Each structure stands twice: as C-alpha cells, then as structure tokens.
C-alpha cells in the first residue's frame, strides 16, 4: 500500500523528507517510522486526519500522515 | 563566590545613594540563582507594603557555573510582582551573568527610590548613581544606545533598561537586557519604574579564580562537546522554538484568537519555517553559549512618503509568535515582527500584551466595552490597530488602558469577561493549550510560568493521562528546576545538565557538592518560594481556571472542569503533606 507522508523539517537531519512510502498491507505506524529511519524517541506525533495515532495503529492505502517532533520549550 | 565559601552580595540603597557589601557563608549551600535570590527576597521584602513601595527589593543572582561553563548564561531576578501581588521571579541572559560575575558579585539587592530618574553604573571598583532625567520617556532601543555611548566598554558590559511602560508602572512591563533578552514576565519593569531606576549598566574585570585549572578545562571541553556535538540542543539552533507553531497546530494545542480555537488557519503563514525562509537574518547567543538560539528576523517599515523604508530587526521565538501571532489572528510573519517591535520599544512583556489584547478584542466583539474605550477598532488580524493599542497600553492613554495595564485578572473585575480571560495563577497564559498538566503547572508553579514545571511536556509525551502521575511530575520537575536555575543554567540545556554532569562541573571548580546536597538545596528553595507566597497572602485555594480553557479542544480533547479542579485539590493536599514533612525535618 502507498502512504503519503508529510515530514516536519525537523527530521531532515535524518535525511528524511516528505513523499510517498510503500508499505506492506497491514503495516502500523511503528512500521512506517522504522521504514523512514527516524529514531522513535525523536517522534512526537503521527497525525492522520487531525487524529493523533498510536504506534500500534494500522495504516491504510491512500493515508496521508503528518510526522512531527514534540513542541520545544524551556 | 568562586574560590570561596560564601556568597558576595552588593546592596544598593537608591534613596540614600549608599552601597554596602556582605559575604554570606550561610547562603553558600543554596548555590546561587533562584536559591539565593529567593532567600534574599524573603529577608528583604515587606509583606505589609504594596509591591511597588520603595522599600520592596529587587534581587539579582547568578550561580557557581555562570559564564565559566557552557550555557550557564542566565541571571535570576526576584521581586514582589505588581501583576500578581506575590512572588515574582524572572530570568534573563544576554551578557548579564558575565557582567555580574566580572563585577565580582554573586548577587545584587536594590532597595529604595531614587530622588530623580537614575541609572546605576556598577563595576568591580565602583557603583555610580547617574542622572537619567534625559533618558526618562525614551524607548528601550534609544536608552540602550545612549548608555552604550556613555559607558563604553563594548562587549564586556550588560545594560538592563526599561521603556515607557515600566516608567508608567504597567504591571507587566519587562526589563530589556542587551537588546535581545528580557526579564519579561511578572512586571520587573514596573518595579524599576517605581524606583525611578531607568537602567543598570554592569561591567568588571575581576579575575575568575579556578584552583585546579587542568580539571576545570577538561570538564569544560567535555561539556562543550556534549553541547555542540550531540543532538541535545541542535533543535534550538535550527528553526528554534518557532518549530512549535506547526506542531501545536496539528495537535489542536495552538491558542488562537483568544483561544476560541486551538488550530489556526494561517499557522503555515506564521510557522517557524516561514519565519526562517522569509525573515531570518541571523542567529545570536548569550555570552557563554555556543548554540545560537536567538533568531533575529528583519522587516521593512515605511517611515515617510515617497517609498522611504527602513529595515528593522527583532528577535522572535515561539511565545512571541503565539501571543502576537495566532492569539491575535495575525496572518503574516512580517506583521508579527512589527508587533514584536512595538512591544520591544515600549518595554512590555510580549506574552501578557498579546493575551490582554486578545481578551480586549473579544470583549469589544461582545459589546462589553466600546471603541470609545479601546480608541481603535480592535479586530483579530488587524495589525495596525494592535500596534496603536500597544502604545496606548504602555502610555496608559485612558481609563481603559490604565485598567488593562494592571493585568487581565484586574481588568475582568472592572469590565467582566472573566470566562474568556486567559489567566492562570494571575499570570497571562503561555502558548501551550496542551491539556491538564500545562493548565495545572502554570497555575501552581511558584512564578506561574510554564517554565516552572513544564507541564506541557507531560501533556505531549504521556501515553495515557494519569492524575497521580501528573502531580508527581509537576512537583518533581519544579524541584529539579529549582536546582538548575540556581546554577544558573539556561533551561534549554536541561538535558545536557543531568545530575552527573552538574556534580562533575561543580566538583571541577572546587564546590564539593553531592547528589544529596543538590536534593536538599532544591527542596529548601522549593519551600522557600512557597513560604514567601504564603507570607504575601497567596493561597492556591483561591485559584480558578478560565472557562474558555474547557471549551476549546486540547491535544487530549476538551478538558473537563471538574476533573481539573480535582487535580488542583490533589496537588494542594500533596503539597501540604510534603510541606509538613519538610518542616518537621528542618
């Protein structure tokens, strides 16, 4: 299945940019993160249709997801 | 004082134009910063007098790591807040910590009221009370320029100064430090104004005595590498905290249009990425910090007919973009910079200013006040209107702006609109509508800042909400921060300065602290601040949360008011229990 991923600029340090990703059917959010190669601890939120997804949630063909870091502060 | 076992304090009496110096061994165990400044405030304050009475003190304190280790850049100020009427604490960097260190002091206590507008010139060999009548009424930028020219010594001196809002005793006037940094929150600028103190210039050439230079230098190099060669702080340099705009917007946590919304349709237009692409011209650092987290943006301003433009540069970060951007419905990065510039020039706290203007806008929309009072049609997204309103606020132009200048809590007593006034613990809201831990954290934090205990971090990282866990987190985090801000490090470096690192740094400069010593001083400082608040008549039992906070979704959906109040009561009970335990041990 094909997922459209919008990756926050913060993750460009890992060589990861926005684009489309091919994943096996039934893949989860954790699988997507592993495929992208972003350290999981660096990921704040994976958002689909304004909903925050859990790592174990399944993705579906045609999904559009946002990958974001945590908000920073002092 | 480095190389000694005491804290060296400069006392300045503005009324008598007298100074004295004390060396206090009994404060050494508190390290410096928050620990020492809170204690000195408690000793010198007058709970029976109003916050702006001339006898109330201003205290500044640096810490043992200040300037000599990376990112130990901040000076802590304590005072009685004219905004909340209770404990005031604010932190600023720039060159201030270095200058106080070089002048040979760990802390400075200022009392009294100058007979005429005055600025203090403090060095390692003198304290001068200089005539500032010619500076009174000038903006922050011009005041800084004139004092720079008079005092000289570029690069080694720090200049703290107020704008007209401080002179006019606006309760949330701040103090500008070296152009790009501020004692922003809780109204230190008004305390300066009440003392006719326009500015303080500090410099010095005092040697820094490091007894074991080899060990110090090895530790410094190790720490420096930890700061610059790991990812721990890189994010603060790149886009910096403005990266939050897109993040908070995506998770329904970006306060927008007086928190009628928690997402902003123009978030991309004022995001950190947009600021960087369209306005960023340089990144600068406080002295002693290799990061460069201060992002400076540039904008054009038309100053005369005939295409006469000037270019202006101001620093921006998340809180400013929130308060003067999304909260006011501002739709362009350049317009946010214009509003920041007005706030800078008048010396107001940007966060409180944005929040009070957002409230005034909704109050006007609802017909509780009229345009006759606001003098300009305040509308979300109307930057020109807000630019004028900022000046009216700083100048206390009419009765309405005079009342607004006392802060939002007091303004609602006169005009109503309390349900949509974004106030937590008497202080205007910070830019994270993330959920229960943020709301509780800002309310119960000693200085009612999101930085007291970083509840917004819990809201973001928790997998499930757990009330006991929230209380544990808030208390534990606030105690640890009491220690970190006594060193005094910048809180952006808190992940660099874990316990092992703190002990290694202290031991390298001959301060033989243990982990237990750090626990003890953190606990003492935590409860000193609580005791000060009690002496000033503050009680958490009187706290009420704004209704608006429960109407607009957070990252966890809409919060429940009863649940929030239950959390507050849990916190109060836990605090009482801990305080009784602490008191019985001491």
Image: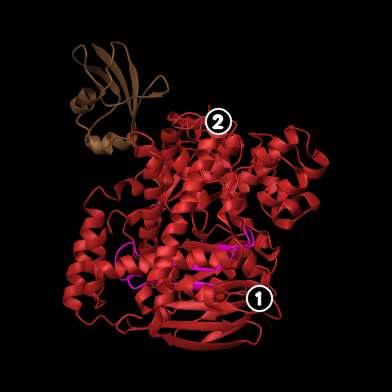
Q: How is the image coloured?
A: by chain
Q: Position of residue B44 (x, y in %)?
A: 56, 78
Q: Secondary structure at mark 1?
A: loop
Q: Is residue B374 left or right of residue B530?
A: right
Q: Is residue B246 visible?
A: yes
Query: Number of numbered discs present?
Result: 2
Q: Position of residue B212 (x, y in %)?
A: 19, 80
Residue under label 2, please give it.
B552
Q: Position of residue B250 (x, y in %)?
A: 43, 29
Note whether B272 is above or below B237 in the view shown.
above
Q: Quadrant of residue B538?
A: bottom right
Q: Nearer the viewer, residue B346 or B72?
A: B72
Highlighted range, magenta: B59-87
> What color does chain A have in the rendering?
brown
Task: Characterize the magenta stretch by its predominant secondary structure.
Answer: loop
Q: Which chain is red?
A: B
Q: Is residue B565 left or right of residue B124?
A: right
The quarter of the rendered structure image containing the C terminus of chain B is: bottom left
Q: Is residue B70 left or right of residue B280?
A: left
The quarter of the rendered structure image containing the N terminus of chain B is: bottom left
Q: Residue at x 74, y 32 (%)?
A: B366
Residue under label 1, please give it.
B132
Q: Residue at x 66, y 35 (%)?
A: B382
| Chain to which mark 2 belongs | B
Q: Residue at x 29, y 35 (%)?
A: A43
Note whether A1 is above or below A10 in the view shown.
above
For marks 1 and 2, give the CA distance.
Answer: 48 Å
């Amino acid at each position: 299945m094909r997922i459209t991923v919008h990756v926050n600029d913060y993750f460009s340090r890992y060589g990861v940019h926005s684009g489309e990703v091919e994943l096996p059917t039934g893949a989860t959010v954790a699988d997507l993160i592993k495929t992208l190669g972003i350290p999981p601890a660096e990921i704040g939120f994976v958002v689909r249709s304004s909903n925050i997804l859990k790592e174990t949630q399944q993705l579906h063909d045609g999904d559009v997801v946002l990958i974001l870091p945590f908000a920073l502060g002092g | 004082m480095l190389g000694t076992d005491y804290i060296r304090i400069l006392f300045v009496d503005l009324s008598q134009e007298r100074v004295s110096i004390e060396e206090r061994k009994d404060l050494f165990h508190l390290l410096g910063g928050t620990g020492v400044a809170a204690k000195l405030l408690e000793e010198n304050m007058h709970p029976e007098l109003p916050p702006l009475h001339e006898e109330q003190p201003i205290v500044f304190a640096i810490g043992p790591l200040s300037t000599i280790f990376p990112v130990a850049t901040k000076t802590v100020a304590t005072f009685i807040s004219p905004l909340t009427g209770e404990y005031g604490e604010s932190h600023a960097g720039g060159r201030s910590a270095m200058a106080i260190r070089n002048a040979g002091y760990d802390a400075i206590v200022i009392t009294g009221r100058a007979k005429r507008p005055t600025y203090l010139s403090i060095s390692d060999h003198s304290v001068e009370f200089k005539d500032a009548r010619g500076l009174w009424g000038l903006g922050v930028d011009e005041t800084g320029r004139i004092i720079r020219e008079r005092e000289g010594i570029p690069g080694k001196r720090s200049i703290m100064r107020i704008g007209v809002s401080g002179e006019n005793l606006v309760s949330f006037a701040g103090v500008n430090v070296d152009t790009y940094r501020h004692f922003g929150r809780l109204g230190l600028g008004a305390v300066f104004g009440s003392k006719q103190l326009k500015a303080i210039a500090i410099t010095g050439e005092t040697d820094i005595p490091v007894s074991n230079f080899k060990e110090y230098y090895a530790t410094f190099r190790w720490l420096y590498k930890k700061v610059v060669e790991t990812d721990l702080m890189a994010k603060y340099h790149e886009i910096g905290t403005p990266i939050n705009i897109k993040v908070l917007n995506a998770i329904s946590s970006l306060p927008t249009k007086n928190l009628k919304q928690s997402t902003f349709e123009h978030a991309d237009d004022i995001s950190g990425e947009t600021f960087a692409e369209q306005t960023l011209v340089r990144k600068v650092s406080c002295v002693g910090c290799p990061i460069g987290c201060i992002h400076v943006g540039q904008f054009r301003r038309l100053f005369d007919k005939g295409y006469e433009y000037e270019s202006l540069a101001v620093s921006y970060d998340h809180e400013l973009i929130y308060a003067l951007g999304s909260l006011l419905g501002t739709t362009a990065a350049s317009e946010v910079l214009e509003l920041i510039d007005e706030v800078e020039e008048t010396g107001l706290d940007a966060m409180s200013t944005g929040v009070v203007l957002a409230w005034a806008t909704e109050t006007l929309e609802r017909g509780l006040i009229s345009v006759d009072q606001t003098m300009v049609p305040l509308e979300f997204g109307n930057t020109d209107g807000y630019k004028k309103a900022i000046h009216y606020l700083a100048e206390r132009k009419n009765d309405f702006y005079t009342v607004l200048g006392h802060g939002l809590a007091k303004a609602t007593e006169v005009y109503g609109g309390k349900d949509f006034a974004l106030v937590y613990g008497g202080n205007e809201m910070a830019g994270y509508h993330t959920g229960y831990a943020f709301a509780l954290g800002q309310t119960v934090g000693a200085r009612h800042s999101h930085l007291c205990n970083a509840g917004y971090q819990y809201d973001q990282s928790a997998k499930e909400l757990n009330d006991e866990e929230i209380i544990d987190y808030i208390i534990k985090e606030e105690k640890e921060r009491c220690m970190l801000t006594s060193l005094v490090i910048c809180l952006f470096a808190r992940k660099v300065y874990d316990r092992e690192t703190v002990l290694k740094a202290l031991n390298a400069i001959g301060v033989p602290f243990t982990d237990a010593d750090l626990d003890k001083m953190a606990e003492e400082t935590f409860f000193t601040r609580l005791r000060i608040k009690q002496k000033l008549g503050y009680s958490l039992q009187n706290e009420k949360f704004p209704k608006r906070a429960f109407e607009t979704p957070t990252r966890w959906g809409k919060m429940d008011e009863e649940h929030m109040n239950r959390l507050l009561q849990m916190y109060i009970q836990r605090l009482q229990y801990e305080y009784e335990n602490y008191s019985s041990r001491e």
